[in-house]
Amino acid sequence: IAAQLLCEITRGEASTQVDDQSLESIIALLDSSDDSVRYWVALCLGQNFGPRAQGAVPKLLKILDQVDCPKRAHTSASAVRVALKRIGAEVPTPKCE
């Protein structure tokens, strides 16, 4: 729930108030083993920070490699793909296709 709230409070104009050090702290949340946290953080980075979150790309690609095409119904893959696109990074083709 905290990651979801983070996404909500950094929306719109509020994202411009987030300094680079705080943005790095948000990106560091992608290291969580909780995939729901990674989902919300990826969504937050893509929707609220876009190209400014370029530093998250390596972590997002690593997560996508872990969660793309799993047997589980819900993963962070969709949010990671949105984040990569909005950041301006190349979005890899799913390996399961």
Image (spheres, rainbow, N blue to C red):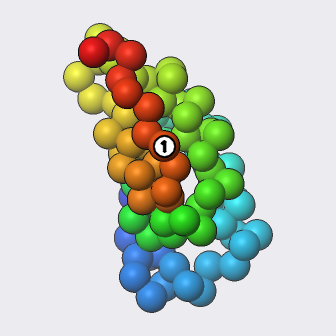
User: What quarter of the picture does the C terminus occupy?
Assistant: top left
Labels in figure, total: 1
- Residue at 45%, 88% (x, y): give it: 13
The residue drawn where x is 52% and y is 49% is: 89
Residue named by callout 1: 90
Element assignment for label 1: loop
Q: Quadrant of the N terminus?
A: bottom left
Residue 7 in sight: no
Q: In the rendered image, which quarter is residue 20 located in?
A: bottom right
Residue at left offset 46%, top offset 48%: 84
Q: Position of residue 17 (x, y in %)?
A: 59, 86
Q: Nearer the viewer, residue 93 or 11?
A: 93
Vertical order, 4 against 92 (above or below) = below
- Badge 1 amino acid: Glu
**At which x and y percent is residue 70?**
35, 15
8 lies above or below 26: below
- Nearer to us in this view, 34 or 45: 45
Q: Residue furthest left?
A: 73
Residue 68 lies in quadrant: top left
Q: Residue at x 37, y 34 (%)?
A: 77
- Residue extending furthest toward the right: 21
Looking at the image, residue 39 lies above or below residue 20: above
Asked whether the viewer can see residue 85, the reply is yes
Residue 26 picture location, percent across and down: 62, 59
Taking depth in this image into account, of 42 and 89 the one nearest to the observer is 89
